[in-house]
């Protein structure tokens, strides 16, 4: 009985950890995307200013 309960808690912990990991990966990817957009945008405006 206790072995089954331990197994269940381990699975729950694993699921929680996976959820957190996915959340962090998603956040990281989102931040990277925003950063890339910012870099691209600043590069774009810089080249536009150069053209003026």
Image (cartoon, rainbow, N blue to C red):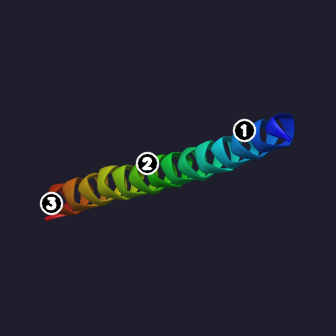
Q: Nearer the viewer, residue 37 or 28?
A: 28
Horizontal and vertical percent position of residue 25: 55, 46
Q: What whole-number distance in Å separates the C-alpha atoms at marks 2 and 3?
A: 26 Å
Q: Which numbered disc covers residue 10?
A: 1
State left or right for residue 27 relative to residue 10.
left
Q: Which mark is residue 1?
A: none
- Which sits in the foreground, 23 or 30? 23
User: Along the polypeptide, which appears first: circle 2 or circle 3?
Assistant: 2
Question: Gap between marks 2 and 1, in whole Å?
Answer: 32 Å
The quadrant in which residue 44 appears is bottom left
Which corner quadrant holds the N terminus? top right
Kind of element beneath mark 3: helix
Q: Is label 2 in contact with label 3 (beta carbons under 8 Å)?
A: no
If the image is split into quadrants, where does the C terminus sit? Answer: bottom left
- In this rendering, is residue 44 above or below 20? below
Disc 3 or 1, which lies upstream in sequence? Answer: 1
Tell me the element at label 1.
helix
The residue under label 3 is 49
The residue depicted at 84 percent of the width and 34 percent of the height is 3
Query: Where is mark 2, residue-wise?
Result: 32
């Amino acid at each position: 009985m206790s072995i089954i309960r331990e197994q269940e808690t381990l699975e729950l912990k694993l699921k929680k950890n996976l959820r957190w990991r996915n959340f962090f990966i998603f956040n990281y990817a989102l931040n990277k995307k925003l950063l890339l957009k910012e870099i691209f945008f600043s590069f774009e405006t810089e080249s536009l200013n150069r053209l003026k």
